[in-house]
Image: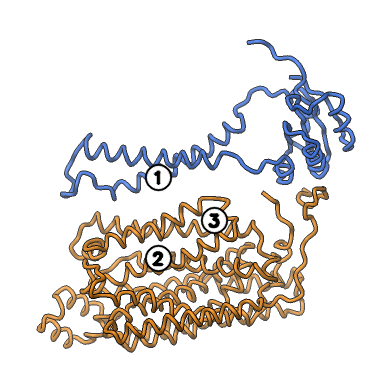
Chain colours: A blue, B orange
Amino acid sequence: MPVKEGTYGLLAEFDTPGALVHATEAARDAGYRRMECYTPYPVEEAAEALGVVRNRVPLLTLMGGIMGLTTAFLMQTWISRWGYPMNFAGRPLFSWPAFIIPTYEWTILFSGLSAAFGMLALNGLPQPYHPLFNAPNFRQGATDHKFFLCLEATDPRFDVNETRAFLEQFHAVSVVEVDL
Amino acid sequence: MAHGNEQHGHGALTEPKTLPASLQAPEAVAAWRTRALIVAAVAAIASLLFLFGGGADHVMRAYLLGWMMTFSLCGGGLCLLMLQYVSGGKWGLLLRRPLEAMTRTLPLVVILLIPILIFAKKLYLWAAFPTFEAVEEGLKSKLLTEAQAHALNFKRPMLSPMSVIVQMVVVFAIMGAFTYFLNKWSLEREADPERGSQGSYDRWRIKFENLSGIGVLIYVGLLTIVAIDFIMALDVTWYSSVWGLLFLVGQGYVVLAAAVHSAIRLSKYEPMATILRKTEQYDLGKFMLGFVMLNIYLAFAQFLIIWSGNLPEELPWYLNRIRGGWWVICTCDFIFHWVIPFVLLLSKDLKRSKSKMLALTGWMIFARGFDLFWLIEPNFPDAARNLHLSGNLSILAYITVPVAILGIWMAFYLTTLMSRPLVVVNDPHTEEILEPEHAH
C-alpha cells in the first residue's frame, strides 16, 4: 500500500463554541464543503452550520427492523410448518398469533443493533488512525476545552495560503497545517 | 457551559420571542364552534330518521359509542392534564389549556349519560334482568342462556341498576372534585402576587404534583369501572382483566390526538403561533407513537392470551368479532387503528409538519371511534357473527349519532376553551418555550 503524503487540511482552534460556529458558517458561505467541527461536547449549532441535517441512521434502523421482522416470522413459520411439524392443542401448524411476540422482539433487536452499529459505521468507526492526531493542540484540547474547525484539503476550494488567510480573519487561537 | 446563547450570524433567531399582547383564544374559535353545531344539527336530523325509521336499537348503541368518545376526551383529558403536572416538561405547557377545557366538559358528559341510564334495558342484560326472580323468568322463557343467568346472578353486586347508578355518582363526584381543584388552582396560580419568582413556581408545582400524583392513580380505577359497566358488560358472560388498561391507553391515544389537533389548529393564530415550536410538536408526535404502540400491544396481548387459553367461556367474544363478515371490520380496525398511525409516525418529517400532523390526528380520532364500533356492535345477537347492510341500513346510525354527539361536545369544549387565556404565564417553561429553536 503506497504511503499517502501531503496535507490533510488546515485546523483552526477556537476558545468558544460561538467563535467556532461563526467561522463554520462563514466557511460554508464561502463555498467550503469538505470540513468538520470537533468539540468536546455536542454543539447543535455547529452541526447546523455544517449543514448536517440528515443522516442515514433512520433508514438503516428501518431496514434492520424489517429484516428482523421477516427473519423471525419466516423462521418460525418454517420450524412449525415444515421443520418440526407438531400438534399443539389441535391448532393449525401455521398458528401465526403465536409467532408475533418473537417477531416483535426480533424487530426491536435488529433495529436497535442496526441503529447502534449503523451509527458507528457511518461515523467511520473504528478508526485507529486519524491525521488530526498529528496536531498537538488537537490531542490536548479536543476532548476538553477547545473547539476546532478543520477545512480539508480535498475540498476544491482549498488552497493552503488562501484558506489560511480565510481562517485567520476569525481570530482563531491558532491555524495549523495538518499532515496526512 | 454557555451553549445555545452565543451570538452568531446567518440571521438566526437568537433573541427570545415576545408573547403577543392578548393571550385570549382567537376569534376563529367561535367560528369553529358554529361549524361544529351545524354539523351536529345535520347529523342529529339524520339520526332522527334512523330512530323513527325502525333503527332505535342501532341509534342507542351508536349513542353509547358517541358517549364513550366524549367520556374518553373528558376523562382522558383529566388524566393527561394530571400526568403533565406530574411529569413536567414543555409539551405539557402547550397542552395545558386545551386539556383543562376538556376536563370542564364534565357536566355535559354527565348529562349525556342520562339517556343511557334511562334506556339501559335496551342495551344491558343487567338492566333488563335486575333481580334473581327476573333472571329465573328469563331462563324459563328462553330469553337467557344458562351461562348468562349464572353470570348475571354472580355479578349482581356490581352490575345492577342501583349499583351502577351509585358507582356513577361516585365516579363523577371524584372526577368533578379533581376537575374543580385543578382548574381553580390554575387560575389562582396566574393571579399569584409573587408570580414570576422561583418561590411561586416551586410552591405551585408542588401543589399540583401532590394532587395529580394520587389523581392519576384514582382515575385508573374510575375509568376501569366505567369501561366495565358500559362496554364490557354489554356481553355479561365475558371478562378480561386488561380491559381497564386497554381503555386507559385508548384514551391517551384519542386525547393526545385531539389536544395536538387543537394546538396545531390554534397555532394558525396568536397567541399559539408564538409558543408552538417544532421541537415540542415533534416530542408530542413521539409521545403519540408510544400510545399507538402500547395500544396494539395490550389489544394483541388480550387476544393472544384468550387464543392460547382456547376456553369456551372467553373465545366466542372474539369469534363474534371475526366471523360472519366481521373479519373485514377487524382487519380495517387493525389497519386504521395501528398500521396507519404507526407507519406514519415513524417519520420525523411528518411529526414536524403541521398540515400532516393535523390530518393524522384527525384520522386517529376517527380510528378510535372505529375501534369502539368493533367492540360494541358484535355484542348484540342480531349482529354477532353476522355483519350485513341489506335490510339493516340503520347500522349507519353509527356514523351519524357519534358525529352529532361529538359535534355538541366540541361546541361545549370550544366554549370552555375561549373562557381562559391560552398561554400559561406563571410557569418557568414559558420562558424556555419562547427561546428560538435549532432549525434541524
In the rendered image, the quadrant that contains the C terminus of chain A is top right
Q: Looking at the image, do the residues carrying marks 1 and 3 touch, with CB atoms under 8 Å apart? A: no
Label 1 environment density (alpha carbons within 10 Å; few <14, some 14–19, many ≥20)? some
Q: Which mark is residue B286?
A: 3
Quadrant in the rendering for residue B247: bottom left
Q: Amino acid at mark 1?
A: Glu
Q: Nearer the viewer, residue A40 or A132?
A: A132
Q: Are marks 1 and 3 on the same chain?
A: no
Q: Please give the residue where the numbered disc 1 appears in the rendered image.
A: A105
Q: Residue at x 48, y 79 (%)?
A: B39
Task: Please state which of the two labelled residues, at mark 3 or mark 2, is closer to the viewer.
Answer: 3
Question: Label 1 vs label 3: CA separation?
Answer: 20 Å
Please tell me if label 1 and label 2 are on a single chain.
no
Residue B256 point in image, percent of width and height = 52, 66
Q: Secondary structure at mark 3?
A: helix
> Of the residues shown, which amino acid type is indicated by label 3?
Lys
The residue lying toward the viewer, choosing from A102 and B343, is: B343
Q: Residues within 10 Å of mark 2 (few under 14, many from 20)?
A: some
Q: Which residue is mark 2?
A: B245
Q: Position of residue B334 (x, y in %)?
A: 36, 58
User: Is A4 drawn above or below residue A148 in the view shown?
Assistant: above
Secondary element type, mark 1? helix
Q: Is A99 placed left or right of A116 in the picture?
A: left
Q: Chain of mark 3?
A: B
Q: Position of residue A12 (x, y in %)?
A: 82, 32
Q: Whole-percent x and y of residue B180?
A: 56, 83
Q: Are marks 1 and 2 in contact (CB under 8 Å)?
A: no
Above or below: residue A161 compared with residue A65: above
Can residue B315 be seen at all in this image of the molecule?
no
Q: Amino acid at mark 2?
A: Leu
Whole-angstrom CA distance, mark 3 to mark 2, is: 20 Å
- Left or right: residue A110 versus residue B414 is left
